[in-house]
Image: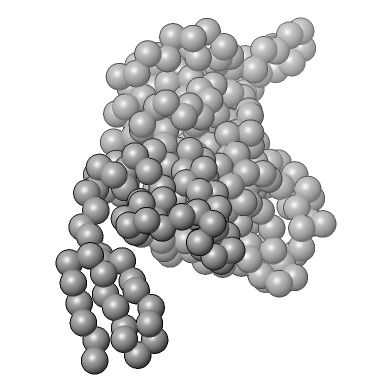
Amino acid sequence: MNTCTADTYQSEEQGVSFPAVKSIPLSALKQNGLLQVLAAASNGCREADISPEVLQAQEEWEAVENLQPGFVEKSAGPIPLISFNEALQYFQTADLSDCRKKIQATVRRRGLSAITHFLFGPPRLHQQLQSERDLALAIAQCGLEDNEKVHMRILQTVYKKLTGSRFDCPRYGAHWEELGFQGMDPGTDLRGTGMLGLMQILYLVMDSQTLPLARDIFKLSQHETQNFPFCVMSVNITRIVIQVLREERLSRECNRRQQVIAVLNDLYIAVFLRLYNIWKTQKKTISDSGFVLKGEKCNGKRQR
């Protein structure tokens, strides 16, 4: 027959005494490792009495705690998704003065090239649209900043919409390589496109009409033989879009629609869709990526 007291639970059959379970305050759990607190709750339990398995478990728990700084900063809940328009409004009001100093709105031409462009080239962008063009180019000069909440929301939104995950992911890690970045830090792949590279992926995944296309392209990028780095490919397409804008090849369409960023997004989608169709129907592989992108760049330059 087993008898219980306030201090111990004793099995007469086995002759073994167990410490009584006591409530442990949450503050103690925060200040001490979980296993240490449980050990401290055992009256008179000495370290020498702890089994090697428990010690190993304690070390593994402490190792998990040490990993926390690499994860997304803890908050009351998951980081909320952000729409393209909300992100754009952020950049419209943010201080981008340093980024604006770096932009070169148009390609500089000299001599015969300048004369030919003036006489036979595309029309100039209307003056009232030049500020929107400069905003797009300034965003392209803006790097990914860990301390900018909107930047992190854009990054998390791209991850969640492509993977279908409901959970936040670490800022750094191999999971970004699975999305098609070259390394564990997406920011290193944005050189030349800056946050505009991420903004165009955001547009692709947050528009209900283009999200199915985004997931189809992402699925193809994971193909056993036709795989390619999805995000790196996307960033390269944004580079083409920026170059075509600076060469004023989009001015006619921008003037007609009285928009710039919307035209950039439409060109980005069109190029990505064309690349997807070529890649899928012609059984392209990663070794063909340079030739395919070069062909799309030439197509982009023919835009009038």
* Whether residue 265 can be seen here: no
Q: Which residue occupies 70% across, 17% down?
A: 116
View extreme (left): residue: 6
Q: Nearer the viewer, residue 28 or 70?
A: 28
In this rendering, is residue 293 above or below 221? above
Residue 199 percent across, percent down from the top left: 45, 38
**Drawn side of residue 133 relative to residue 81, left or right:** right
View extreme (right): residue: 287
- Quarter occupied by residue 220: bottom right
- Which image quarter is the N terminus in? bottom left
**Drawn side of residue 44 relative to residue 111, left or right:** left
**Drawn side of residue 113 relative to residue 249, left or right:** right
- Which image quarter is the C terminus in? top right
Q: Which residue occupies 44% across, 9% down?
A: 97
Colour scheme used in the picture?
one colour
**Drawn side of residue 83 relative to residue 162, left or right:** left
Residue 10 percent across, percent down from the top left: 29, 78
In this rendering, is residue 36 above or below 88? below
Residue 112 percent across, percent down from the top left: 77, 12
- Quarter occupied by residue 287: bottom right
Q: Which residue occupies 73% across, 8% down?
A: 110
* Whether residue 226 can be seen here: yes
Q: Nearer the viewer, residue 62 or 19?
A: 19
Q: Nearer the viewer, residue 80 or 219?
A: 80
- Total numbered badges shown on the rendered structure: 0
Q: Which residue occupies 34% across, 59% down?
A: 42
